[in-house]
C-alpha cells in the first residue's frame, strides 16, 4: 500500500510540474509568480538590458538554438524570456479570435504632449521624487497610452511591442469578463441574486453551487482553493494542468478542461464574508455568461463590444484543449484598443452616439463593492479600495477605477480628469505590489497635470 501511495504522490508531483507550464503563461493572479529564474541568480536586469529585441529572442530563420522559445520549455515565461513571450502567445499556444468586425476603426485624435515625460511624483513609501519617464523603465513598460477627453496625448512603445502588435492583458481579462456579466445583469438577462446551480446545474455539487452570481462577480465566494504560486502542491497548478491544451500525460487522471476542474472545487468558509482574489471565479462567471448568452465569452465580447467600438485590431483569447476561452486571463490585444475600452467606460458606455454598455452597468462598477470585505483580502497598498464587477475601485477623490493584471497590465480610468491610461508591461515580478508604488502616484500626477 505504501508503494501505491508513493506512486500516487509521484504522479501528482509530475502533473503539478506539467501544469505549471500552462500557468506561467496565463499568469493567473496577483501573487508572486515565480518567473525570475535568471534574475534571481544575481542582480535583476534593467528594462534596457532585458529588451527582447536586443537579446535576440526568436530572431533569425531559424533562430539560433539558444535563442529559441517554445511553449514546452519550462522557462519560456521566465524573465527575461517572458519579455518576448508576452507579445507572442499566439505563436506558442492555441487561441480563439475576438473579431473587430469589418467596419473602419474609430479614429483617436492626437495631440502629443511630450512634457508629460518630465512630470515628477513621489513613489509610495519613498521620499525621492521620480519622473514619469523614469517610471516607465522602472516598471518594464512595453507600451503606454494616455487619453485626455478622448485625445491621445501620450504614447510610447518599447521591448517587444509596437503600435501594430498585441500583448497579453493577463488579469485585465477578468474586468472585461466582469463587464459582460454586469451588462447581462443590467439588461435583466442574468439575475445577480440567483444561485449559480440554477444557471449551470453542472456546478451544483461544487463550491459555486450555492453562491450567488453577485458573489462570483465580486469574488466573495468561500472556496477551498489555493492560488499560492510558491506552494508546488497549490490548487492553482492542478487548475493549470486541467486547462493545459497540450496532450495529457498517459498517467493523468484529473480534470481535462476548465469546465471539468470547476466542478471539483469545494467550499471553505461562507460566501459573502470576505474578498478573495481567485481566478476560478472569473472562469465560473465565463461559464455562467456562456450558458445565459448561448455563446462563449470570446464571441460575446466581439459581438457586444469589440466589433462595435471601432477597434483597430482583432483581439484573441487563449483556450484549453476543448477550445474554452480562458476568461480569467487569456486576452491579448493592441494597446490602443485597450485604451478604447477605458474611453468607452469613461463615456458612460456610448461611442459615436451608440450605446454599447448599459449605463447602469457602469454606474454599478463605479459605485464599488464592500470595502470591509475587500480589506480582508490583504492589499496594504490599496487601503480604502473595493472590488465590483471584477474591476478595482479606488474610491479616491477622482473616483478612479481600473483593470489590473500581473506584470503591470492596466487600464486606469479617472472620471474627474477625463483621463484613460492603458499600459502593457513585462515586470519581472508578477505582483502589482511591485509596480503600484511607482504607478498609482504617477497616474495621479498625470491626472493633476491634465486638469490644469
Image (cartoon, rainbow, N blue to C red):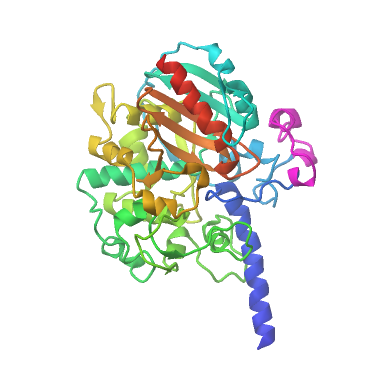
Q: Residue at x 60, y 27 (%)?
A: 136
Magenta part of the chain: 39-67
Q: For this rendering, which residue is in front, 193 or 183?
A: 193
Q: Which residue is drawn at 48% across and 29% down?
A: 422
**In the picture provided, is 367 more to the left or to the right than 240?**
left
**In the picture provided, is 290 more to the left or to the right than 38?**
left
Q: Which quarter of the figure has residue 267? A: bottom left
Image spot of residue 438 (x, y percent): 58, 32
Q: Is residue 346 visible?
A: yes
Image spot of residue 154 (x, y percent): 51, 18
Total count of labels:
0
Task: State which quarter of the image contains the N terminus.
Answer: bottom right
Whether 311 is drawn above or below 242: the answer is above
Q: Residue at x 69, y 40 (%)?
A: 81
Based on the picture, tell me whether residue 282 belongs to the magenta stretch.
no
Task: State which quarter of the image contains the C terminus.
Answer: top left
Whether 450 is drawn above or below 188: the answer is above
Q: Can residue 390 be seen in this view?
A: no
- Report the residue that reaches farthest toward the front: 127
Q: Which residue is drawn at 57% across and 58% down?
A: 228
Amino acid at each position: 500500500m505504501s508503494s501505491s501511495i508513493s506512486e500516487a504522490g509521484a504522479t501528482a508531483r509530475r502533473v503539478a510540474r506539467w501544469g505549471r507550464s500552462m500557468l506561467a503563461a496565463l499568469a493567473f493572479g496577483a501573487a508572486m509568480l515565480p518567473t525570475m529564474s535568471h534574475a534571481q541568480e544575481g542582480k535583476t536586469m534593467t528594462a534596457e538590458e532585458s529588451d527582447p529585441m536586443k537579446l535576440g529572442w526568436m530572431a533569425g530563420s531559424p533562430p539560433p538554438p539558444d535563442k529559441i522559445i517554445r511553449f514546452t520549455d519550462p522557462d519560456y515565461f521566465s524573465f527575461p524570456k517572458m519579455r518576448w513571450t508576452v507579445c507572442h502567445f499566439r505563436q506558442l499556444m492555441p487561441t480563439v479570435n475576438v473579431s473587430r468586425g469589418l467596419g473602419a476603426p474609430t479614429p483617436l485624435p492626437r495631440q502629443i504632449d511630450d512634457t508629460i515625460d518630465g512630470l515628477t511624483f513621489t513613489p509610495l513609501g519613498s521620499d525621492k521624487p521620480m519622473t514619469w519617464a523614469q517610471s516607465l523603465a522602472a516598471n518594464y513598460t512595453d507600451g503606454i497610452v494616455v487619453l485626455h477627453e478622448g485625445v491621445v496625448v501620450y504614447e510610447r512603445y518599447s521591448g517587444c511591442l509596437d503600435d501594430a502588435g498585441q500583448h497579453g492583458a493577463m488579469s485585465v481579462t477578468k474586468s472585461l469578463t466582469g463587464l459582460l456579466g454586469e451588462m447581462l445583469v443590467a439588461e435583466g438577462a442574468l439575475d445577480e441574486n440567483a444561485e449559480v446551480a440554477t444557471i449551470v446545474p453542472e456546478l451544483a455539487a461544487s463550491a459555486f453551487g450555492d453562491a450567488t452570481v453577485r458573489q462570483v462577480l465580486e469574488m466573495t465566494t468561500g472556496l477551498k482553493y489555493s492560488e499560492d504560486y510558491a506552494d508546488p502542491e497549490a490548487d492553482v497548478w492542478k487548475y493549470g494542468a486541467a486547462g493545459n491544451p497540450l496532450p495529457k500525460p498517459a498517467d493523468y487522471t484529473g480534470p481535462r478542461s476548465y469546465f471539468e476542474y470547476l466542478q471539483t472545487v469545494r467550499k471553505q468558509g461562507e460566501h459573502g464574508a470576505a474578498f478573495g482574489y481567485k481566478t476560478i471565479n472569473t472562469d465560473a462567471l465565463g461559464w455562467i455568461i456562456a450558458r445565459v448568452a448561448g455563446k462563449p465569452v470570446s464571441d460575446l465580447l466581439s459581438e457586444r463590444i469589440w466589433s462595435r467600438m471601432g477597434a483597430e485590431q482583432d483581439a484573441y483569447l487563449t483556450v484549453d484543449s476543448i477550445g474554452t476561452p480562458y476568461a480569467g486571463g487569456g486576452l491579448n490585444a493592441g494597446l490602443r484598443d485597450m485604451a478604447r475600452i477605458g474611453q468607452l467606460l469613461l463615456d458612460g458606455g456610448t461611442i459615436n452616439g451608440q450605446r454599447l454598455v448599459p449605463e447602469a452597468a457602469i454606474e454599478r462598477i463605479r459605485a464599488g463593492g464592500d470595502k470591509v470585505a475587500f480589506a480582508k483580502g490583504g492589499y496594504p497598498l490599496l487601503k480604502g479600495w473595493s472590488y465590483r464587477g471584477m474591476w478595482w475601485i479606488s474610491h479616491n477623490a477622482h473616483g478612479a477605477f481600473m483593470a489590473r493584471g500581473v506584470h503591470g497590465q492596466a487600464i486606469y480610468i479617472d472620471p474627474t480628469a477625463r483621463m484613460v491610461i492603458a499600459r502593457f508591461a513585462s515586470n519581472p515580478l508578477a505582483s502589482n505590489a511591485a509596480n503600484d508604488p511607482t504607478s498609482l502616484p504617477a497616474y495621479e500626477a498625470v491626472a493633476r497635470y491634465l486638469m490644469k
